[in-house]
Image (cartoon, rainbow, N blue to C red):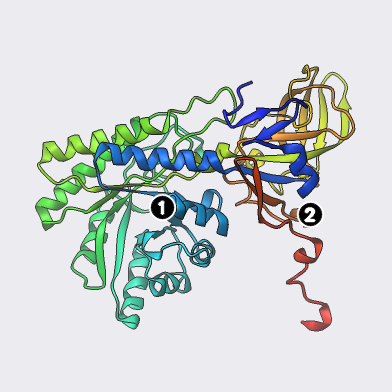
Amino acid sequence: MKISETVTVNEQNHLTIDGKDAMNLIKKYGTPLYVYNVSLIRERARLFVDTFRKLGVKAQVAYASKAFSCIAMCQLAAEEKMSLDVVSGGELFTALRAGFPADRIHFHGNNKSESELRMAINAKIGCIVVDNFYEIECLKRLCGELDTQVSILLRVAPGVEAHTHEYVVTGQEDSKFGFDLFNGQAEEALMKTLDDTFFNVLGVHSHIGSQMFETEGFVLAAEKIFNQLLNWKKKFGYFPEVLNLGGGFGIRYTDEDRPLPVSDYVEVIVEKIKSLAYEARVDIPEIWIEPGRSIVGDAGMTLYKLGSQKTVPNTRQYLTVDGGMGDNIRTALYDAKYTGVLVNRVYDQNETTYAIAGKCCESGDMLIWDLPLPTVKEDDYLAVFSTGAYCYSMASNYNRLPRPAVVFVENGEDKLVVKRESYEDIILNDLQLNEI
């Protein structure tokens, strides 16, 4: 099984993460434990940023913080000169508390509340990605009250369906996101905002799906959007400064996955937009993208203590970890696929195929259905790879389980960036009956 170049095995047959023995992390911080390889995060971020720079186009690479957000991650994104995509007041608050430059924050979401929009306007963030007519009217009212102008992108649905899981496809016509590009909604939104002094319409945004291993979807979306932009140029004399093609770049979860190199996605997108602009004799718009999973996904892993076992004769051997759907709901939600190894016996011979189960009181609380491992012994630990995206961010207190700690590792040094929750944390907001 392939292991990342920065995930290695030491002389004790222990998994190491950027030079740090994972067993030492377990002894220091306990389990379950999210661990991020910061060197790999930096490498991915720089590949995106540097590829645009080498291709000589204006661009912003905005980290999609919904993949994994905490103060330390926002600060790391700022260090790597990225912009930041937030989708809620909580993510915006985290970014601002982290000291992230407000003018590099982009605010997404299909149902932003008035209080969230007010927070964004008061913080003077760089851009609000407008998703619907309700939001246009709400923003117009708030800008009038606050006597200010906001920069916006109009989110459009280009009718392109990415080759990915149906639950995470967002660019097709039947979607809760954005203005449809071809039924007149997008043009109506442009007309409502273009000549309104409260709005600075920077351009348009689209997102066609997630976990994509090909570039054809981005090319097709760019063509459809560009053609409509040229129509708007003729009708309204408007051509955007910014074209945002979203994210969705795939990563490797198992050996079946074949993601492209980061630079391939960027090169194809830039080449296509350059070609379209040249043919139309218009300026190349500033290109924005929003990688999230491809920045942090396979830079993260989760470490678990192994516990109970159950044998179903001629059917399955269950092996339980001390976490589960509370810290990784993706298998239950998306039928996501993962792989892993024993932290303390990486290269021991695989002898048994286990079904890795969580400890939540749900039969669907499964992490991996078929994982070959050495015969498990007492005090063994499991590392599940590529849990850096949408695991911590979707973690819950189901069954009143505390959420795990998060540790960053870089060049052999570890740093706690999110504390482990305690039982006291879980009941912090509970009230006694006589207090209600």
Q: Residues within 10 Å of mark 2 (few under 14, many from 20)?
A: few
Find the distance from the CA under tag 2 to the CA under tag 1.
Answer: 32 Å
Between 288 and 210, the one nearer to me in the picture: 288
- The numbered mark at residue 399 is 2
Q: Residues within 10 Å of mark 1 (few under 14, many from 20)?
A: many
Up/down of 177 relative to 46, above or below: below
Q: Residue at x 87, y 35 (%)?
A: 379
Query: In terms of sequence position, does the residue under pointer 2 or pointer 1 come before the other?
Result: 1
Residue 70, x across and y down, in percent: 57, 57
- The numbered mark at residue 51 is none
- The numbered mark at residue 177 is 1
Which part of the image, by quadrant, shows the C terminus? bottom right
Q: Residue at x 43, y 28 (%)?
A: 260
Q: Is residue 283 left or right of residue 9?
A: left
Q: Are marks 2 and 1 in contact (CB under 8 Å)?
A: no
Q: Secondary structure beneath disc 1?
A: loop
Between 394 and 289, the one nearer to me in the picture: 289
Between 155 and 42, the one nearer to me in the picture: 42
Q: Residue at x 77, y 23 (%)?
A: 373
Quarter assignment of residue 366: top right
Up/down of 296 relative to 419, above or below: above
